[in-house]
Amino acid sequence: MHELSIAEEIVRIVAKEGASVKAVRVSGASVSVGRLMAVETDNLLFCLDVLKKSDPLTEHTIFTVEEEQLQLRCKACDHVTVTDEFLFACEACHSQAVDVIGGEQLEVSYLEVESHED
Ligand SMILES: [Zn+2]
């Protein structure tokens, strides 16, 4: 299952980043997932809820998933196309010579942590 391996990766990143700031626990995390990752958001959230229990840092993390749209830069006219479709063509000049500049990312965009109070 595709979402499961992506969820594993996200939990690993969140736990690592939480540990690097010496957090006691990570209370919230936002995940930015590109459209091209073809992730079913509900599925991903379900997998995250299961996997997060394997690490005390992420056990109580509330995850939110944001899907980033596909972004293409046209090599012919430099127009940037933003779309929800899997359409690899420039909307301005219809050229198919485009570079994908957004929609492939998988990143933790925001982390809310709790630290030791002393
Ligand atoms: Zn174009």
Image (tube, rainbow, N blue to C red):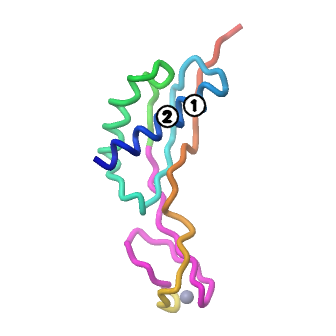
Q: On residue 16, which mark appears? A: 1
Apparent side of residue 49 relative to residue 69 in the rendered image (left or right): left
Mark 2 C-beta to ligand 1 under 8 Å? no
Residue found 44% across the figure and 79% down from its top: 88
- Seen as rendered, the residue at the extreme top is 118
Residue found 61% across the figure and 21% down from its top: 23
| Label 2: few (<14), some (14–19) or many (≥20) C-alpha neighbours in 10 Å | some
Whether tag 2 and tag 1 are in contact, CB under 8 A, the answer is: yes
In this picture, is 16 found above or below 72?
above
Mark 1 C-beta to ligand 1 under 8 Å? no
Residue found 49% across the figure and 63% down from its top: 103
Apparent side of residue 21 relative to residue 58 in the rendered image (left or right): right
Quick check: which quadrant has ligand 1? bottom right
Q: Nearer the viewer, residue 20 or 23?
A: 20
In this picture, is 85 found above or below 79?
above
> Would you name the residue on which mark 2 appears?
12
Image quadrant holding the C terminus, namely top right
Percent of width and height locating residue 52: 41, 28
Percent of width and height locating residue 18: 59, 28
Q: Which amino acid type corresponds to the residue marked 1 in the rendered image? A: Lys
Q: Quadrant of residue 113?
A: top right
- What segment carries the magenta color? 65-91
Q: Quadrant of residue 115?
A: top right
Q: Which amino acid type corresponds to the residue marked 2 in the rendered image? A: Arg
Q: Nearer the viewer, residue 21 or 113?
A: 21
Q: Could you tell me how many numbered marks the image carries?
A: 2
